Amino acid sequence: MSGRKRVDGQRAYVLHAHPYSESSLVVEAWTRDHGRLALVAKGARRPMSALRGRLMAFQALEMGWFGGGEVKTLARADWQGTPAGLRGRGLLVGYYLNELLLKLLPREDPHPRLFDAYAEALAGLAALVPEAALLRRFEKSLLQELGYGLTLDREADTGRPVDPAATYLYVIERGPLRMVEGDEAGDAVAGRTLLDLAAGTLEDPRSLAESRALMRRLLAHYLGGQALQSRRVFMDLQEF
């Protein structure tokens, strides 16, 4: 955007917000058509501000902004429907989704399909849909949208369909290789797990466990060593 160009009527979510000066906020917003943006919400911390209380995580919003720099100025933010109403584990999972987006999405790079997948994931968490399969579907969508397309249904070296009865090693940025004698079994994954993950139908306990380990390894690679605070908090709470 250049000059003082104004954008309006954009579907958006707040991923994070932090204080800016005595009365304002800087909001990390994720918009459907313009991607992730940094927006200054002037006066949003004042008691009588129209923005006060609206810039909450997991609340579907319609936003407008203006400005030409890296940080733009928020002009309006209106509620769209009721908040997702996340609580307990669902709230922690929601913050995990937000943190993934903050760390992996470049600024001003729109991903409408991923935006819709995020909205669907929030709705599922609010409806208490089992979170494990929901998370794997979102993580897979995130990596695919960012160009890290996952090969899950074909063997990387032969191109043949993955055999549900075989065992594989998943090589990052290449795909599944059928295990042979002598391979280390630490990162082994069943062919059935790969096919279940590809189809998004994760109901088998083994598929759930192995797909979780695989996606964690893939995300750690693409995060490049960045730690996820939300995951650490969740693990601390489980220990407590």
Image (spheres, grey):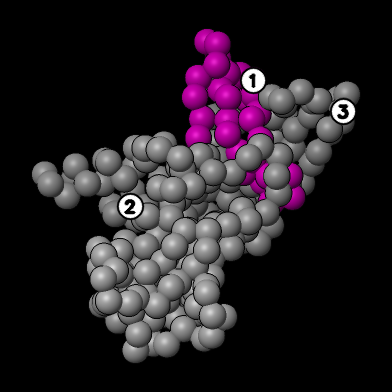
Task: Classify mark 2: helix, strand or loop.
Answer: loop
Residue occupying image coordinates x 38% and y 81%:
191
Alpha carbon distance from label 1 to label 2: 29 Å
Q: Is residue 126 left or right of residue 114?
A: left
Q: Of all residues shown, which one is farthest toward the front? A: 182
Asked whether the residues under the numbered discs 3 and 1 touch, taking CB atoms below 8 Å apart as contact, a structural biologist would say no
Residue corresponding to mark 3: 2
Residue type of the residue flagged with mark 2: Arg
The first of marks 3 and 1 along the sequence is 3
Q: Nearer the viewer, residue 229 or 225?
A: 225
Q: Which mark is residue 42?
A: 1
Answer with mark 1 or mark 2, whichever residue precedes in sequence: 1
Q: Is 20 covered by the magenta stretch?
A: yes
Secondary structure under tag 3 reads loop
Q: Residues within 10 Å of mark 1 (few under 14, many from 20)?
A: some
Residue 164 in the image, given as x and y percentages of width and height: 39, 87
| Residue 29 within the segment the image draws in magenta | yes
Residue identifier under label 2: 87
Q: Is residue 166 left or right of residue 235?
A: right
Check the image and report above or below for 52 versus 110. above
Name which of mark 2 and mark 3 comes first in the sequence.
3
Locate residue 8, reporting x and y percent: 79, 41
Cα separation between marks 2 and 3: 40 Å
Q: Is residue 192 left or right of residue 104?
A: left
Frontmost residue, 70 versus 49: 70
- Say which residue appears at 27% left-offset and 76% top-offset: 181
Q: In what quadrant of the picture does the C terminus appear?
A: top left
| Type of the residue with mark 3 | Ser
